[in-house]
Amino acid sequence: MKQGYYEKAVKGFREFIAKHPASELSGNAQYWVGQNHYAVLNYRQAVEEFAKVVDKYPNSTKVPEALLKLGYCHAELGNYDKARTTLSQVIARYPNTDVAKSAEQKLASLKAAEPKKTTDTKKAPEVKTDTKPKAADTKKTK
């Protein structure tokens, strides 16, 4: 979908929220604002929008998905500790649900992507990188 469609969608959802702030659907609309930013890879803005779902609409049916997407966004932004913390919250708050399973999968992929830590403290042997010929090597032999 083209960027313009996402912008129109966000505008429409924001207008709904402004006109109906107490509606049960406002949390849902706020989630879709975040989802639109997520879809166009605008993760920083998506974090802000998904956080609003959790903070402003704590009883919304979209809170579990918003928390999950917060975890995904933090991972995409390289905030791995925040991602792990948020995804762990999803699992703890919504056990045995599809969002918990998705959070578990993302946590596993984050763990698999971590560099292996070695306990070997020995330094690797130093390798010379100077490839310039020595003076003796440059003389031609007859």
Image: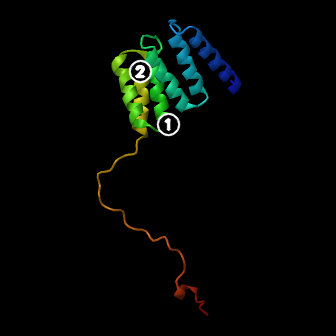
- Classed neighbour count for the residue bearing mark 1: other residues with Cα under 10 Å, few (<14), some (14–19), many (≥20): some
Task: Please tell me whether residue 27 is drawn above or below residue 73 in the rendered image.
Answer: above
Residue 54 location in percent, x, y? 44, 19
Task: Please tell me whether residue 47 is drawn above or below residue 93 in the rendered image.
Answer: below
Q: Residue at x 42, y 32 (%)?
A: 83
Q: Could you say which quadrant of the image residue 105 lies in?
A: top left
Q: Secondary structure at mark 1?
A: loop
Q: Residue at x 43, y 39 (%)?
A: 113
Instruction: Please give the label number shown on residue 77.
Output: 1
Amino acid at circle 1: Leu
Q: Is residue 92 toward the left or the right of residue 62 in the image?
A: left
Amino acid at circle 2: Lys
Residue 17 location in percent, x, y? 56, 12
Q: Is residue 22 toward the left or the right of residue 94 in the image?
A: right
Is 77 or 142 nearer to us in this picture? 77
Residue that badge 2 annotates: 101
Residue 5 location in percent, x, y? 69, 21
Q: Secondary structure at mark 2?
A: helix
Is the C terminus in the top left, top right, bottom left or bottom right quadrant? bottom right
Query: How much space separates mark 2 and mark 1, taking CA atoms?
Result: 22 Å
- Classed neighbour count for the residue bearing mark 2: other residues with Cα under 10 Å, few (<14), some (14–19), many (≥20): some
Is the N terminus in the top left, top right, bottom left or bottom right quadrant? top right
Task: Please tell me whether residue 118 is drawn above or below residue 65 in the rendered image.
Answer: below
Q: Residue at x 56, y 13 (%)?
A: 29
Is label 2 in contact with label 1 (beta carbons under 8 Å)?
no
First in sequence, mark 2 or 1: give its number: 1
Q: Is residue 63 toward the left or the right of residue 117 in the image?
A: right
Question: Can you see residue 65?
Answer: no
